[in-house]
Amino acid sequence: MNIHEHQAKDLFRDAGLPVPEGKVAFTVDEALAAYDHFGGVVAVKAQVHVGGRGKAGGVKIAKNADEVKAAAESIIGLDIKGHVVERLYIEQGSDIAKEAYLAVILDRSEKSVGFIASAEGGMDIEEVAESNPDAILRFGCDTKVFPEAEARKAAEVLFGGEGVEATLKVMHQLFDLFLEKDCTQAEINPLVLTGSGDVIVLDGKMNFDDNALMRHPDVLELRDMNEEDENEILAGEKGLAFISLDGDIGCMVNGAGLAMATLDMIHMHGGEPANFLDVGGSSNPDKVVEAFKLILSNPKVSAVLINIFGGITRCDDIAKGILTAFDQMDITVPMVVRLTGTNAEEGKKMLEGSSLIPASTFGEAVTKAIELGKGSAA
Amino acid sequence: MSILIDESTKVIVQGITGRDGSFHTGQMVDYGTQIVGGVTPGKGGQEVHGKPVFNSVKEAVAETGANASVIYVPAKFAKGAVLEATEAGVPLIICITEGVPVLDMVDVYREVQSAGLRLIGPNCPGLISPGKSKIGIMPGNIHKPGRVGVISRSGTLTYEIVYALTSMGIGQSTCVGIGGDPIVGTSPRDLLPLFEADDDTDAIIVVGEIGGDEEERTAELISKQINKPVFAYIVGRSAPEGRTMGHAGAIVSGSAGTAQSKIEAFNAAGVPVADTIDQIAEMVKEKLG
């Protein structure tokens, strides 16, 4: 799960990190009210769950109320990579002497917690990794012990020997926050050394492990539904992994790997999938009903491909769900079904006499769905 | 032979009294797996499918001599369950549970490693040495004893491949589902040398997916250490960037973790990469004759 910059900064502030003061604004008037509070120079920043805000015109510096008004007007409603800006963060300006990069991440390669630090701050770290990989310091640790020696070395490099103790403190605090909130990433870019020698967090980003949200109700409250696809939110509530795509072949598959393989296979046969959907590792028939509702709520869907290989998900439960969905819904698009694996025979028997179109192999199921989709769309 | 498990492996089931634990215990018993008991705290003394239930792993191991444990507990208890098996010194721990917090796994991985034990999973279907023992949730009937090793990050996708192999008359020595999470206990790099050393394995299939760099590292290891033929299949070629494709670990981040990068790495290591499930089975058949 992602959160907005201003939310990350609230968490940073609570954790003791040095963060400039700021206020959230949803309207131009609120932006002006925030400016009244701060005065001087402020940054007007778009709050969206996507990087590259600055380049897209989503971050502006304003020195008076007129400039704040103009900035707010231009940024609210701005489309940044498909994310429409609905909220702003008005932040007190900072006197930037030097910029650096600091992040604590989940390092899946090393199966550890990892630090990434660079004296080249304020830029996309992936770009730095390309253009100047030597400028990036990486070191790892477990969840128990802060890597004091390596962190100190990095802190000495970040601002050329200035602000070492303050930087080290930021590293400690960021590490603790990362662990406390079950993050997969806690990034500060840039970490700034001010003209007066203070170290402050100018921009922050946090990503959380979805699997750990169960123990962080405070983090869950920060979720901004406007940043997410409506169907994907619904799917999440029903315990389904669902991603909206651009094509017309609806897919219901059990198992993420098989679902990915199904999308690949549809592409390979010249079709376009309408969605990714993994009905998951349980065998709850209600889930199947919900899965159908999600797939069929997309008017572009011209055919549905149900690809089930039974392991922990029993095919008879899937069949029960399919039949229940049929009873509850007015289904007009062709549905191609393939069931194999645990309790497959029981499942197939249950579906006999329905209008479902059976397929015995993966390849046959995919080509049938694409063909029938063409017929149904025409 | 086979790797990791065979007919002599004695298995306990953690979470044996739960819906999934109980159902799959029955399936494993029916397959012929030597299930020697189960563990559910507070339910010691009961029986499930005729197998004794114990209150702790330690007690279960002491009473039964189990040398493997399979875990079917809810995600929030998974870390505790693996650590309990680790403390009891169970050499092979298989965690089926999906949705385990990844930082729990950072901790667990270290504990298991320092104890010199092996963890498979989490978020995996388990492993099977066909005709000998199955530990996990895969449908046993699609497997056939034989000489192909299978390593996979995905459950159902592995079943598809095994089904295709079996349909062509090609059996399997051992199939290991390593799990779809960003951090898992055992990687293909840990398993390939075991298959290389196994006299009854002639070829190995590696099934990968988008996310991370495990496949790239695997390709490197293959080019240096593995002489048996290896075949690969990678899914998620059409996955959008930045989206988690069901498995917590299946995500393309920026330019990292793409299917293309993995396919290129395998190609560079001389490992043929199949485009479809049927094709990988055909490749193996052609090679083995």
Image (cartoon, rainbow, N blue to C red):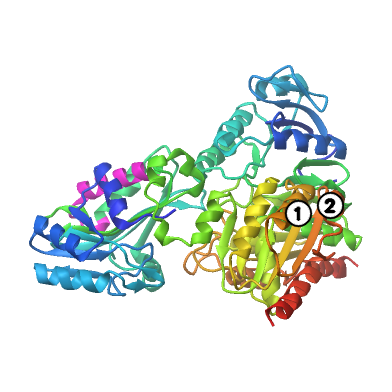
**Picture layout, residue B70 above or below residue A313:** above
Give me the residue at 21% from left, 69% from top.
Answer: A72
Q: Secondary structure at mark 2?
A: helix
Q: Quadrant of the C terminus of chain A?
A: bottom right
**Badge 2, how many Cα within 10 Å: few under 14, some, many 20+?**
some
Q: Is A162 within the magenta?
A: yes
State yes or no: discs 1 and 2 in contact (Cβ < 8 Å): yes
Give me the residue at 81% from left, 38% from top.
Answer: B28
Choose the circle earlier in sequence order: 1 or 2: 1
Foreground pick, A346 / B55 = A346
Q: Quadrant of residue A282?
A: top right
Foreground pick, A242 / B148 = A242
Residue extending farthest to the bottom is A378
Identify the residue position indicated by label 2 in the image.
A350
**Badge 1, how many Cα within 10 Å: few under 14, some, many 20+?**
some
Q: Quadrant of residue B95?
A: top right
Residue A97 visible? no
Q: Amino acid at mark 1?
A: Leu
Residue B27, given in percent of the width and then of the height, sits at: 82, 39
- Left or right of residue A260: residue A163: left
Give me the residue at 53% from left, 49% from top.
Answer: A237
Identify the residue position indicated by label 1 in the image.
A323
Foreground pick, B238 / A189 = B238
Residue A162, given in percent of the width and then of the height, sits at: 17, 55
Mark on residue A141?
none
Q: Secondary structure at mark 1?
A: helix
